[in-house]
Image (cartoon, rainbow, N blue to C red):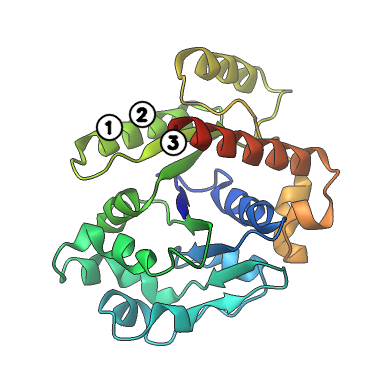
Amino acid sequence: MKVLATYSIKGGVGKTAAAANLAWLAARDGTPTLIWDLDPQGAVTFNYRIHPRVKGGAKGIVGEKRPLEDAIKGTDYRSLDLLPADLRYRHLDLLLDQVKRSTQRLDRLLSQFEDDYEWVILDCAPSLSLTSEAVLVAADAVLVPVVPTTLSTRTLDQLTAFVAEQVCTDVEILPFLSMVDRRKKLHRELQNELLDRDPRLLRTPIPNASAVERMGLLREPLVATSPHHPAAAAYQALWEEIRERLHETSR
């Protein structure tokens, strides 16, 4: 089982769209896949037409008072399950702070699914927090969407520094360019600069496209509704690149 987290300190960078599309692609060939919507806003849960509610909420999950598997919902797609968001996830930091080995709790919870899923994708809220630390411990790799703007690239540097401070994780950071508009000079310049200076950067950019924004209206992944759209093709290429990169590091 491989655990991937879509995560950024900055909001509005295409994190949730990436999570929704990559999860669908992971499950496309019948590979058992679970997506856990850890963001209290619940956008991934909404996009998959599932009610954002977990019995017992964050308290029940962190305290292990209810089996986590009981909260899992099937989606409309074969082999793809979802652990819904819940508004009470906003208390996750406080609850984790009250348990022993708090940063290892998510990893412990997910370990029970080792034989059930090949891929687990965590969609995380944009923050630097105790939950963030727990995600870094649980994940094999963190997929970081970076819009080619000064503020977005700055948050990648901040995240890199934050990860370097965590002594209990060897998570791989895999940034990728998101919401790229090649008509903008700044986007072109920063895209080329990042490709030159950061060997971690995945080479497939996700274009800025209204079709991605329409996912919230259709409540379906773009790769499912319009697989031939340029943005959908980019997600497919990005997923293949992610798989290849993880394969290389596991050798």
Residue 225 shows in the view: yes
* Image quadrant assignment for residue 159: top left
Q: CA distance from mark 2 to mark 3?
A: 25 Å
Tell me the tag on residue 157: 2
Which residue is at 58% across, 33% downward?
A: 244
Estimate how packed mark 1 is, as few (under 14), some (14 to 19) or many (20 or more) residues with alpha carbons within 10 Å: few
Badge nearest the viewer, 2 or 3: 3
* Front residue of this view, candidates 69 and 213: 69
Instruction: Name the amino acid type tagged 3.
Output: Ser
Mark 3 or mark 1, earlier in chain = 1
Q: Which residue is mark 1?
A: 161
Which residue is at 47% across, 66% downward?
A: 115
Q: CA distance from mark 2 to mark 1?
A: 6 Å
* Front residue of this view, candidates 137 and 119: 119
Q: Position of residue 92 (x, y in %)?
A: 30, 68
Residue 208 shows in the view: no
Dot 2 and dot 3 residues touching (CB under 8 Å)? no
Q: Which residue is mark 3?
A: 250
Decide if residue 105 is on the left or right side of residue 127.
left
Dot 2 and dot 1 residues touching (CB under 8 Å)? yes
Instruction: Name the amino acid type tagged 1.
Output: Ala
* Image quadrant assignment for residue 59: bottom left
Which residue is at 29% across, 39% downward?
A: 170
Q: Secondary structure at mark 1?
A: helix
Q: Position of residue 111 (x, y in %)?
A: 36, 64
